[in-house]
Amino acid sequence: MINEYQTQSELNPKLWTNEEFNPKLRLQLLKIAKAFYKFLGITAKIKDVTLTGSNANYNWTTHSDIDLHLIIDYKEVDENDTLVRELMQSKKSLWNNTYPIEFKNMNIELYAQNAVEPHTSTGVFSLLNNNWIQKPDPKIVSVDDNEISTKAKPYEFEIDNLDPYEDGLLYKIQNIKSRLKHLRQTGLETVGEYSIENLAFKSLRNSGHLEKLSDLEKDITLTQLTPTLDEQDFEGPFGQEHKYADYGGPWGTGHHHKTDFKKGPGKTPTKGIGSGMDAEEDKDADETGYKIVNKENFADGKNPGRKGLSQRVGIPKNATIAQLEKASKSKGEKGRLARWQLNMRRGKK
């Protein structure tokens, strides 16, 4: 038991009236729960849909989450409880990131709970049966260690399973940080330091998960801001009108001095230098998706293959040796390309 403290004198009036749950909202939440169940892709029967947390208690604030739990028997999914729990955590994170549903500025968070888990919260309301499973005390609310762990564990799982090479990673990190900020704000507005939300936030900080999140964000930002010279036309810092190609690069004299290529004797404009060379290779590239960049062999005696493939599989342009060594441990195309680039850098045949 962590602490006890005085709380609100009534349940959240946005959800409750004289301890009776809003009937229309109840049906809408059950509809959301049904959609979440379908999203889980399982056949285990729903034993109950419960409302728990501060909105089923007297320690609510205007920013408290609406915590909906689908009660299922994990054994009906798989005999391995640990595997099912990780699956449910993963599905929870994916759902909440994909469908950030709110009701009157309160996030609606969903989770599939194992039926054999004990009710640690002092307030649990069955939305399916429209009655209290554990009715809270309006005078004193107790905070249990298990409640803190239950609040923190989904964030721990989500942070631990972030892929540093995944597209859209920065958005995911910012989304998690925003939710964590909201979580702590909710707790501090309730009773301060000893709220479940604030203690869960401190738990994540003490376990190193917040530092891990910040380090990932910093690495991505540094990678994005590191100057690179891509082999492609770019429009300059001031848009299409000031296109570098129009006036001889970034230090040109202005678009009034751009070179205009005139039409040749035929019906089409004169093509660029080297046009028409290796026409068969160009045709092969269009048909196969592979292009020979040049005919010289590299250090390992192979051609580089598809242009830009390294970046598409998550290897940064101009990656350091350390980054390539890390990526070389990956499976599939990413690992193969990283090992190939290491060999090329080190001059191995």
Image (tube, grey):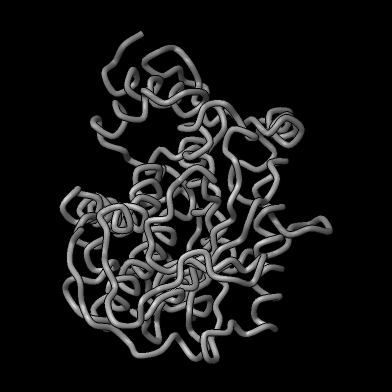
Height in image: 121 above or below 12? above
Q: Is residue 106 visible?
A: yes
Q: Is residue 204 left or right of residue 90?
A: left
- Viewer-closest of 193 and 278: 193
Q: Quadrant of the N terminus?
A: bottom left
Percent of width and height locating residue 31: 71, 68
Query: In percent of the image, x 52 and y 55: which residue is there?
Result: 111
Please indicate whether residue 219 sits to the left or right of residue 32 in the image: left
List x then y, in percent, for residue 187.
28, 75
Q: Which of the 4 image quadrants contains residue 24?
A: bottom right
Give the percent coordinates (x, y) of residue 7.
28, 83
Using the image as rendered, state which of residue 295 and residue 165 is in the foreground.
Answer: 165
Q: Vertical placement of 299 versus 33: above or below?
A: above
Quarter of the figure that contains the C terminus: top left
Relative image position of residue 317 (x, y in whole percent): 37, 42
Q: Residue at x 50, y 53 (%)?
A: 232
Depth check, front residue: 308 or 83: 83
Q: Tell me which corner region of the image, top left, top right, bottom left or bottom right, holds residue 34.
A: bottom right
Residue lying furthest right: 267
Taking the spot 26% from the left edge, 67% from the top edge, the residue there is 142
Question: In this rendering, does residue 244 appear at all?
Answer: no
Would you say 187 lies left or right of 299 here? Answer: left
- Please give left or right for residue 129 compared with residue 137 in the image: right
Q: How many marks?
A: 0
> Closer to the camera, 149 or 117?
117
Q: At 57% across and 61% down in the image, what residue appears?
A: 98
Question: In the orientation shown, which residue stands out farthest toward the top?
Answer: 349
